[in-house]
Amino acid sequence: MCCADQPRPFTLCASILAADFAHLAQDVQAADAAGVDVFHIDVMDGHFVPVISFGTGIVRTMAALTRKPLDVHLMVEHPLAFVPELTALGAGLVSVHAEIPGGPGEALQTIHAAGLRAGLVLNPETPPEAALPYLPLLDQILVMTVQPGRGGQLYLPGSNEKIAAVRTLLQTHGSKAAIQVDGGITPRTLPAAYDAGARRFVCGSAVFGGEIAHKVAALRRANSI
């Protein structure tokens, strides 16, 4: 008799950017019940990326809707201005971009000083080595597998090779930072990204829209062996 498929565990971070904001509470509750691990919140300022999504107030809303951890991705030019409010509102992990003016060092230090976990985001064109000066401050590296700023994009070719390079960099320097990936994650693209070293997956349209419980189950099932 053949053995049942064995799941390979990963952290599923549901991006609320893809949720139905006319029915946000229902979508969040459905995703929560379906077993997502984290809710991912993209804050965009219309400057660092050309799109405005929502401000930090959505963190307050999410904290009222779920007890799951809140993972905030700041696609903003000046993340320092956001850290005090995010701390007060109950964010758990805050990620900032390597590409921001002046570099991310001060923001990462401020995030840690506030008692939060810190992540560094690498845009598709940013090499893994950009994270080297900040490794002692990092709880995660977020590898963008699409161009930041809008949902629904396709997974970029070469992303798995970059994830593997980030994994090698972390291992070489003894860092325990997790690798998160964001963009184009589906049941088809998730397993290879996992094989490359990612363990935290931001999923938007792969969770929201349609039957959420079935979509979450499909993501979990896709990463079984």
Image (cartoon, rainbow, N blue to C red):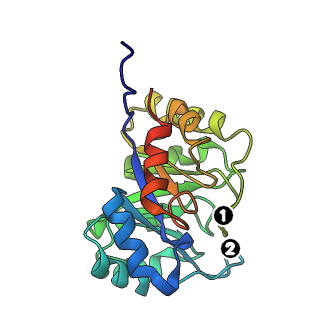
Pick the front one: 102 or 64: 64
Residue 113 drawn at (x, y percent): 29, 67
Instruction: Determine if residue 39 is in view.
Output: yes
- CA gap between label 1 and label 2 equals 7 Å
Pick the front one: 120 or 110: 120
Around disc 1, counting alpha carbons within 10 Å, would you say few (fewer than 14), some (14 to 19), or many (20 or more)? many
Q: Residue at x 28, y 82 (%)?
A: 64
- Compared to 202, does 106 lie above or below? below
Q: Amino acid at mark 2?
A: Val
Q: Residue at x 33, y 64 (%)?
A: 32
Q: Earlier in the sequence, mark 1 or mark 2?
A: 2
Residue 121 drawn at (x, y percent): 55, 56
| Most distant residue in the top direction | 1
Q: Residue under label 1, please give it.
A: 148
- Compared to 41, does 132 lie above or below? above
- Compared to 43, does 95 lie above or below? above
Q: Residue under label 2, please give it.
A: 49
Q: Dot 1: what SS?
A: loop
Around disc 2, counting alpha carbons within 10 Å, would you say few (fewer than 14), some (14 to 19), or many (20 or more)? some
Q: Dot 2: what SS?
A: loop
Q: Residue at x 37, y 57 (%)?
A: 36
Residue 125 drawn at (x, y percent): 72, 50
Is mark 1 in CB contact (under 8 Å) with mark 2? yes
- Classify residue 120 as left or right of residue 122: left
Q: Amino acid at mark 1?
A: Pro
- Compared to 100, does 139 lie above or below? above
Instruction: Determine if residue 134 is in view.
Output: no
Residue 64, label in figure: none
Picture quadrant where residue 18 is located: bottom right
Residue 126 drawn at (x, y percent): 67, 50
Pick the front one: 101 or 201: 201
